[in-house]
Image (cartoon, coloured by chain):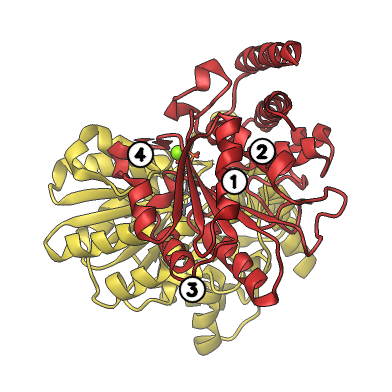
Chain colours: A red, B yellow
Amino acid sequence: MNNKELQITATKVRKGIVEAVHSAKSGHPGGSLSAADMFTFLYFEEMNIDPKNPKDPNRDRFVLSKGHTAPGLYSTLANRGFFPVEDLKTLRKLGSYLQGHPCMTETPGVDMSTGSLGQGVSAAVGMALAAKLNGDSYRVYALTGDGEIQEGQIWEAFMFAGAKGIDNLTVVIDNNGLQIDGKIDDVCSPYPIDKKLEAFNFNTICIDGHDFDQIRDAFAKAKECKGKPTAIIMKTTKGKGVSYMENQAGWHGKAPSDEEYEQAMKELDEQLAKYEAEV
Amino acid sequence: MGDIVKIATRESYGNALAELGKVNPNVVVLDADLAGATKTSTFKKAFPDRHIDCGIAEANMTGIAAGLSTCGKIPFVSSFAMFAAGRNFEQVRNSIGYPHLNVKIGATHAGITVGEDGASHQCLEDIALMRTIPGMTVIVPSDDIEAKAAVFAAAETEGPFYMRFGRAAVPVINDNPDYKFEVGKAVVLKDGTDMVIFACGVCVAEALGAAEKLAADGINAAVVNIHTIKPIDKDTVLEFAKKTNRVFTVEEHSVIGGMGSAVCDVLAEEYPVKVTKIGVYDRFGKSGPAGALMKEFQLDAEGIYNQIKAKI
Ligand SMILES: Cc1ncc(C[n+]2csc(CCOP(=O)(O)OP(=O)(O)O)c2C)c(N)n1
Ligand SMILES: [Mg+2]
């Protein structure tokens, strides 16, 4: 996909996020929207996956360590063809296969069950290690929040991956600057993230997480790098794409009202029309 | 049920902390990026300097609380039950339980009434985990009044406490002049002769509802609120087991290791009698509205009634 097509797809992914969270009347739009461009690039460009064969042993793996942003992952999987986009509306409802947090035994395309922050990177390290042990060539990707990296286990996983040179692993850190209680640097600053990761023997790349050229370039560099895992620290806007959600901690885990939903969909439709006109 | 007041016990926790802060300057509240959800934000508003946001780092928060308590502070450690008891089990066991430190754990969002967040956040194992730790007092309040009383009792009593609060609003059932909260003392809500239902937490109000339905069938069930799981009120458990010779336990927790198991521990040794443990049967929760889940898991009044009827 070229950048225009990626932008169009990412906007559809954003619409799916808003649709799902509105229908569920709960859920986490902020961090789903900040990572929507990353989700889109991973599933439409970067990863070797097949929606018709979601359990293919040779597929690339993705672990959503910040599991609360499941709406972002679900919308991406749906738009990629793993399941019907229509089903996004069942999010969080009784009996739905779209649980509040990712569940690998329920949802096609979900590679790891997550939701308790700080645990996903360890699982991703395990998957990458298995590839090494088995001589397989698949790659493993993990996405963490910038608040999430306050968890100690994250750094245990980073230390292991760096020490063992797990170079088939790429960890993306969504640096949207916000967690639930406010700004990450007010609550308990994890900065400087890049210097810490370099000290943990990571190949560290800092990018704008809404710029597809920079995203593309970062993954190319990650693949070239041998002997070290890669960390992509992406600066993003929490709530990206919905004006009133942008950079607002209050939109971390709240569903839009009917009125707010209409406005969000109108804004996203306008963005979609603009991108489509530019093609 | 129109005029019944409903309050979530996490609200009660936050409100009690804010009141406690006024009378006890040593009380400090620790939070892990969930001040709004655990309602410690109420305390934070009143005492910003005594509210410590540790970030998303529950294990570290637990250790910090242990250290604070060795220097005379009374820390209330707050997070969801899944993390406060689950993720932190070993820190609680070794850094708080083993040295018997004066740390109070306020665990909110316990059980399936977490609702839409789903299984990853619905802790059904915390009572089991916490009651195995020597010296740990474990309290599961049933309503607003009991939750507030538990917080004050915890602050006044030396030693580690685990208090389990809920996300969903529950009816206030203890709003009467005779009500008195005492750690380790069960509350008899309804006397009865045919069977006794021991309940805790959100299931107490539901058990009362079930007893009403049983009464309509001519079955006279006693309902006893076991708010303190540890140390359990052996005398009251034995008294009602002997009086009725048929015991049911009801809890929003796994039937493995919870309040029902604590009751069985007493009865197996001192008065073997038939016990049916009603709770979550060795399975995980799932996403859905809290009320719908209580129905689906047969823990609402109707479900409890049906489960009891099926056993007698
Ligand atoms: C272990 C654990 N503690 C607490 C939570 C509750 N929680 C859910 S999201 C969140 C904040 C996450 O912030 P961040 O990692 O920055 O995510 P993002 O901004 O990308 O949404 C918290 C504390 C959790 N899910 N897991
Ligand atoms: Mg963040």
Q: Residue at x 27, y 58 (%)?
A: B154
The image quadrant where one finds ligand 2 is: top left
Q: Nearer the viewer, mark 4 or mark 1?
A: 1
A207 w.r.t. A257: above or below: below
Q: Position of residue B294 (x, y in %)?
A: 66, 49
Rendered position, B101 above or below A48: below
Q: Amino acid at mark 2?
A: Phe
Kind of residue indicated by mark 1: Phe
Residue drawn at x 49%, y 62% is: A228
- Residue at mark 4: C-beta within 8 A of ligand 2: yes
The amino acid on which the numbered mark 4 sits, given as a three-letter code, is Ile
Amino acid beneath label 3: Val
* Quarter of the figure with the C terminus of chain B: bottom right
Chain hosting mark 1: A
Badges 1 and 2, same chain:
yes
Q: Nearer the viewer, residue A152 or B98?
A: A152
Residue topped by disc 4 = A184
In the displayed structure, B183 sits above or below A102; it is below
Q: Secondary structure at mark 1?
A: helix
Q: Chain of mark 3?
A: B
Instruction: State left or right for residue B111 relative to residue B41.
Output: right
- Give how far apart the Cα atoms at labels 4 and 1 are: 26 Å
Q: What is the C-alpha distance between the residues marked 4 and 3?
A: 49 Å
Check disc 2 and report the residue beneath it.
Answer: A41
Mark 3 nearby-residue class (10 Å; few <14, some 14–19, many ≥20): many
Report the disc number at residue A219. Answer: 1
Q: Badges 1 and 2: C-beta atoms under 8 Å apart?
A: yes
| Mark 2 or 3, closer to the camera | 2
Foreground label between 1 and 2: 1
